[in-house]
Structure formats: C-alpha cells, structure tokens
C-alpha cells in the first residue's frame, strides 16, 4: 500500500520518493548515473586510479593538486541547432554537464609525481606512494641582549 512519506520512519530521507517513483524503473528508484565511476588499485610502489568519463574528451578533463587533495573535474558543453530556409529555429538544444571528484593523496605528493593519461573515455592516474618524512625537531633560541 502506498502511504504518504510522513508516516514512514525515515520520512526525511525519502520525502520525495513517492513523487519520483515509477513502475517502469527498477525497484521504483531513480536510475543511478555511472559518471566518474572509479577503481583504485594498490601495488607495491603506487596507486592506480581509473576513472570512467564517458562522453568527455581529453580537453574537457582537468586534474589539480592542492593541499594534498587530487581533484579531477570534467565539463562538457554541447549545442545543437537546426534552422529552416528562413533562418528560423526548428530545434535548438543545449547541454552542459560538470562533475568533480577529490581524493586525498597526501601533502608530500607533487604534481610532477603524478602520471596521467586519457584514452577511450577512461582517465588513468598513477600516484606514487611516499612515506611521510618525520619532522626533525628544530631548536629555536631567543637572543639575549646585554
């Protein structure tokens, strides 16, 4: 029986489920997007990150490193226009999509350490493992005048 969301124990979590529920969708849920699905493999000396970016070109993808966080972002824009003989629009569609994902790789990793390649909609990043160097205690002295 379908009852309003407020009568369910977790009504805040699924408040809009009844609105979006459809008998045509699997188990009544919204379809999940497979954007930026990521596999991380660990080997002896590095981590290999493989990220699916279907529909994106190499020029659409950016990778940056700041404060130990590796951030991958992708942005895609597409415009389709069809005009008739009188230069009036028959159809005009615009699409813009962005996605972003971050991973903490450690503050000792630099941009030069990371190797990246993009082929067939898959971004592959090789991030070396670096041990955190123990900080050497530095003694600081106060100058005494007199």
Image: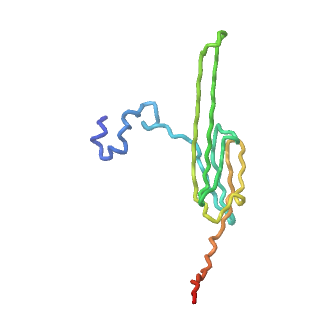
- Tally of marks: 0
Instruction: Point out residue 79 in the picture as x, y percentages from the top left corner.
Output: 63, 27
The residue that appears at 64% across and 66% down in the rendered structure is 108
Please, is residue 3 above or below residue 87 in the view? below
The residue that appears at 37% across and 42% down in the rendered structure is 14
The residue that appears at 65% across and 50% down in the rendered structure is 63
Asked whether 88 or 102 is in front, the reply is: 88
Q: Quadrant of the N terminus?
A: top left
* Residue lying farthest to the bottom in this orientation: 146
Q: Is residue 114 left or right of residue 16?
A: right
Asked whether 126 or 67 is in front, the reply is: 67
Instruction: Point out residue 114 in the picture as x, y percentages from the top left corner.
Output: 70, 57
Instruction: Point out residue 51 in the picture as x, y percentages from the top left corner.
Output: 63, 48
Instruction: Point out residue 122 in the picture as x, y percentages from the top left corner.
Output: 67, 45
The residue that appears at 58% across and 34% down in the rendered structure is 96
Asked whether 135 or 7 is in front, the reply is: 135
Q: Is residue 25 left or right of residue 130?
A: left
Q: Quadrant of residue 74?
A: top right
**Scheme of image coloration:** rainbow
* Residue lying farthest to the front in this orientation: 146
Q: Quadrant of residue 49?
A: bottom right
* Residue lying farthest to the top in this orientation: 86
Q: Quadrant of the C terminus?
A: bottom right
Please, is residue 89 above or below residue 122 in the view? above
């Amino acid at each position: 029986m379908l009852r309003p969301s407020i009568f369910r124990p977790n009504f805040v979590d699924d408040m809009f489920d009844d609105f979006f529920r459809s008998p045509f969708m699997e188990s009544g849920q919204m379809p999940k997007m497979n954007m930026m699905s990521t596999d991380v493999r660990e080997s002896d000396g590095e981590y290999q990150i493989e990220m699916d970016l279907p529909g994106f070109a190499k020029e659409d993808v950016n990778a940056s490193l700041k404060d130990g966080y590796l951030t991958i972002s992708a942005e895609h824009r597409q415009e389709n226009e069809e005009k008739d003989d009188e230069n009036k629009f028959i159809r005009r569609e615009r699409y813009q999509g962005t996605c972003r994902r971050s991973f903490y790789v450690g503050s000792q990793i630099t941009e030069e350490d990371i190797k990246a390649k993009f082929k067939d909609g898959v971004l592959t990043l090789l991030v070396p493992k670096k041990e955190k160097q123990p900080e050497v205690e530095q003694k600081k002295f106060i100058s005494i005048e007199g």
